[in-house]
Image (cartoon, rainbow, N blue to C red):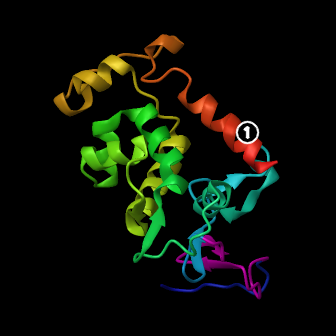
Amino acid sequence: MKMNQGANDKFSGSSTHRIVDGKKHRLCRGPAHEEPVWLPLTEKYFYLREAGNPSAGLKSPCRLCNLYRHSGMKSGGLGEHGFVPAHEIQPFFIEGINRVGLQEFSRRVGMHYENVGLIVKGKRKFIRKMNAKKAMLEIVSIRREGEIRHKKSILRGSAIRGETERVVKSRTDLYKPNGDSELERGRRRRGS
């Protein structure tokens, strides 16, 4: 990693901003990281201060830390080792299934679909931190891309078969029509 810091650059001399390999980076010390991490200063890693207004700048904590704070997880950092109570991470698994289906979300997270189903049903007491972190990162990615699939395409497995997927035209085309709005209401209620 080559560090370039010009004398007249606003990033020079800052302890939280750097230019690494010609790209702007910001230091994130949030709760989702075991130790501080340098992340590229882009919308992929940080939320906008005002939705739809890139000139307003980016929020300070990264997307993963923001998600971590709003999840209510009190189990320490999301390192690779240890366990997290399943009820703390369950909403993220539910949202992932509502958006892309059980099989696809299980494949992306790298867990067997039966285990994901048991987490969603509340029959698991603990989840490995590594799997919780994968699920949260996948939800960040799904939200950023605005990915929602048609329920018939999910059930048919159109993406895996290489077929064109159906387009979601109404609420009845969703895998679970009220899934995300119910989760958002609950998050807002817990946040205030």
In the picture, measured across the screen, residue 106 lies left or right of residue 174, that is left
Around disc 1, counting alpha carbons within 10 Å, would you say few (fewer than 14), some (14 to 19), or many (20 or more)? few
The single residue placed furthest to the left in the displayed view is 161
Q: SS at mark 1?
A: loop
- What residue is at 79 percent from the left and 76 percent from the top? 10
From this view, report whether residue 41 is shown above or below residue 22. above
Magenta-drawn stretch contains 99 = no
In the picture, measured across the screen, residue 70 lies left or right of residue 10, that is left
Quarter of the image for residue 151 reads: top left
Q: Position of residue 24 (x, y in %)?
A: 63, 70
From this view, report whether residue 155 is shown above or below residue 78. above
- What residue is at 23 percent from the left and 27 percent from the top? 157
Q: Position of residue 121 (x, y in %)?
A: 40, 41
Closer to the camera in the image, 147 or 175 = 175
Reading the image, the residue beneath label 1 is 52
From this view, report whether residue 190 is shown above or below residue 18. above
Q: Position of residue 65 (x, y in %)?
A: 62, 64
Q: Which residues are magenta?
A: 10-31
From this view, report whether residue 186 is shown above or below residue 172. below
In the picture, measured across the screen, residue 168 lies left or right of residue 20, that is left
Magenta-drawn stretch contains 16 = yes
What's the amino acid at mark 1? Gly
Closer to the camera in the image, 190 or 45 = 190
Closer to the camera in the image, 35 or 46 = 35
- What residue is at 33 percent from the left and 42 percent from the top? 117
Q: Does residue 107 appear in the picture of this structure?
A: no
- What residue is at 56 percent from the left and 75 percent from the top? 77
